Image: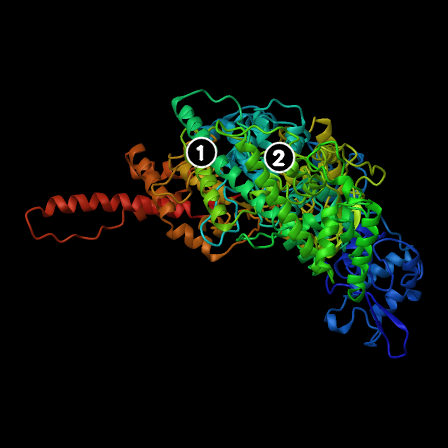
Amino acid sequence: MTTRQAPNGRMVFRIAIPLCLAVGLCGSSATASDISFSGDVRPILAEYCVQCHGPDEQHRQADLRLDIANDSTTAAIVPGDPDASEMILRLTSADPDMQMPPPEMQKRPTAREIEILRRWIDQGAKFEGHWAYQPIRNPEVPEPKGAASTEIDRFIVAALEKNGLTLAPRLDRRRLIRRATFDLIGLPPSPPEVQAFVNDAAPDDQAFAKVIDRLLRSPRYGERWGRHWLDIARYADTHGGSAIGFTRFPFSYTYRDYVIAAFNEDLPYDKFVLQQLAADQLDLPDNDPALAALGFLTVGMQFRSVHDLIDDQIDVVTRGLMGVTVACARCHDHKFDEIPTTDYYALYATLASSESPDELPVLGEPPLTDPLRDYQRQLVKRQTIYRDMARDQMEVMRNRLRSQVGLYLTELAKGVPEQDLSAAFLSYRTDDVRPVVLHRWRIYLNTLSEQDPVFFAWVRLQETPAEQFQAACEGLVQTLKAENGDPAKFKDLHNMSVEAPKWNPRVLDALEESKPASLIELAEAYGKLFAEVHLGWLTALHEASLEATPAGDLITDEDPRHAEINSAINQQLRRHLYESGTPTDVPDELAAKMLNRTVSDKLSGKRGTIHNLHLNAPGSPPRGMVLAESEAPPETRVFLRGNPIRRGERVEARFLTAVAPHNPTPFADGQRRRGLADAIVDPENPLTRRVIVNWIWRHHFGLGLVRTPDDLGTRGTPPTHPQLLDHLATAFADDGWSIKKMHRRIMLSDVYQQASVENTEARRRDAENRLLWRMPRKRLDMESMRDALLAVSGELNTTTMGGRPFDLEADPVVPRRSVYAFINRDIISSLSSTFDGADPTSCTVKRPDTIVPQQTLYALNSAFVQDRAAAVAELAVDAAATNTDRVEWLYERIYLRQPDQQERDLAIAFVTRPQRQVETPDEDATEVASVAAVANETDRWAQLAHAMLASNEFVFLD
């Protein structure tokens, strides 16, 4: 909804309604007597109205909200009277100034959409809280008239019966085991496994239960479902964002291996989440393999800006685990959901308090082999070389900064605005202003009072007008000199008992001599003095050190020659240069980022040797990509419009207010990520369990009960079966948050075991199959397709699990499961881009699902597919002596069934068609022709196998 001024001067409300609303049978009650706000009305308002008339108070127009009922809604809606409601008047008006939506939107609501809104208003215009934020309630299981084997079926069949529909017939056992095996382990079943299931005399449900249990016990299960989870975790093996080349993570694989092991072990999902957010805060042993779980936060894109890095972590936590788009509130209140910017920055405060440590923990206890010993020796050597150089160069830089106080004070005096310190600076010279140091001086000076004995002039005069500055400074100096009294009292400065006066005499003398006429000149005066103090201190240290040499003269500690060291006046000045926390006492982690370009490049090279050792040394042990949280993190404020140098109100680290409105308790310092993890898996959190059961359901059916699995908010689609969703979420908790038990529940249902056959009447009534009157047909994902090709060709290696990634495009092919392949954020593999692989740069809850010509062209022209066809053809030739037996062997191997007579005849006709004659004029003609004929025959079988592997029957699941 928008507003604009009408010609008559009064404000016109414009309520935008979509041109067409696709309302599914199950998710909408628009065809029934009662209109549902969540199912029927909210999608209309969310698409076109809520952006300007929703939660975002800053951009809300006409002070009108249309996502909730409040005083403002009466301006547009009169409950019970649609004809008197401004909303309906605008929707049906032909006047361009009154028309809703406005003509410039080039959209007009259909009569059906207007009727939905009219009926909703006529029925009282009742608003409802958004379904996703309502508590999970275990609904009563319906009692349909038709057959329903499980509680899941009773929900599905009841909804079908209301619309005059039924489930499709049960799938035959051969295709059912293929569906189940690909679903659970991402591989085709072997022909003996198929035959065993087909021949099992047990009833269908018992026989199929045995198949499911066997698959869930397989180590291949974790590889399949671990790959699904890695999509969410935006897993990759490179940092990303490299214009030239790329940087690899040495230990990203440890997170991947942790995920696979967690699924195989059926680690309860709540513990799975806890470990991925706060494994280091669960009192685990220092080398516990579960520490690798923190890769969930650390294995993402390595942005140059720390703000972008934290934004990515907020996104993967909230969208990936709870289906809410909190990252949309980075710059302003969320335009559609109740997520203010304060919620975003509360999570920012939670995650910003943690950083990756320099030393990552070794996982487990690797055996002390010769390669490990060699790695350890090399590591100590390279780390020592790096530390030696870094220590000295950082100390050089600190001492230069102590001679440059005037440089930084002058910049502040010029009014240089604050900079975003997250920006990456590629090069420094000695005389460059380092933004981090400038910021430290800005903050430090703001903490000093007018009573500071050194910076009193800066604090008191910084706001003085230019024309009054010199006189004000001279007057201040004379006044403070008088307060100090007789200078003779401070002449014996070598005596450590002599205390400094209230106002530092060296500062007063410097100001009296320089007579600064502006803040810039005052900065220069301070800078000159501090440079003298620093050089005097270095000289005094040098001379005092000489006294301890064998040839040195011993001098008593309070000798006048030690006045530079003992002077309390000099100590007052040196406090601002050397004391911990002062601007020039830069911590190592900051100092390492501010070294001169030449030094920085040399140190980067030495760090690179350590990185390469971790990455390539045969004895390099696995390490966890952990985080370390500060016990005393700095305060966090809202970044106004997302700008880190425009700070708004202060925020505490806490959870989302929309999810926990009555529990605003901040997370404890040092345990913020643990607090966040506990809040996410809290049984009272209505989002987490709904999201995970919907995720499991989606990977079994191709579509979730909520079709927008990463957005359960206003812009998302409501669930097709809301009661079933809550039933599953309740059962999930009752089953101890077990994902394997949820698989079993879903797969033993009639709705899962039904065929994918088409039904014209059902299609007419429910074109999108929202009611699940048939099983959706699915194409194999990229990993399953590649692994299946290797499996049927007999090449797949399933014995080697885990470890460092392999090159997916290596030649010869590495026949390992695709989940272990190297993933490059900077250069996406052609296989992944062609077959809708996950985008590793961000959290991917739902992969794209496309059917494009490139996919078929790959299947027909790819050397990988052709080589697998040749390998399986060779197996067929070796396995059977006759053409008929070979054809049957290929069909059993690839399609897990026997060919019908027509298929058999066509295949045999293809491989036995007349061979091209080879003309050979010499005496070896017979031998050459014989070899050519054999090669030609082998090629025919490879061509037949290639056609079968490229067919829809192989790459789609019924």
Q: Which callout, 2 or 1, points to the residue nearer the camera?
A: 1
Residue at x 41% of width, y 50% of height? 859
The answer to whether residue 515 is left or right of residue 290 is right
Above or below, 817 against 34 in this view is above
Element carrying mark 2: loop
Q: Amino acid at mark 1?
A: Arg
Residue labelled with disc 1: 382
Farthest residue toward the front?
488
Farthest residue toward the bottom?
7
**In-front residue for pair 829/156:** 829
Q: Amino acid at mark 2?
A: Leu
Counting the numbered discs, the total is 2
Confirm whether residue 357 shows in the render: yes
Rendered location of residue 301, percent (x, y): 57, 46
Q: Which mark is residue 627?
A: 2
Rendered location of residue 572, percent (x, y): 72, 41
Element carrying mark 1: helix
Q: Quadrant of the C terminus?
A: top right
Which quadrant of the view contains residue 749? top right
Q: How is the image coloured?
A: rainbow
The answer to whether residue 591 is left or right of residue 145 is left
Q: Which mark is residue 36?
A: none
How crowded pointer 2 is (Cα within 10 Å; few <14, some 14-19, many 20+) is rated as: many
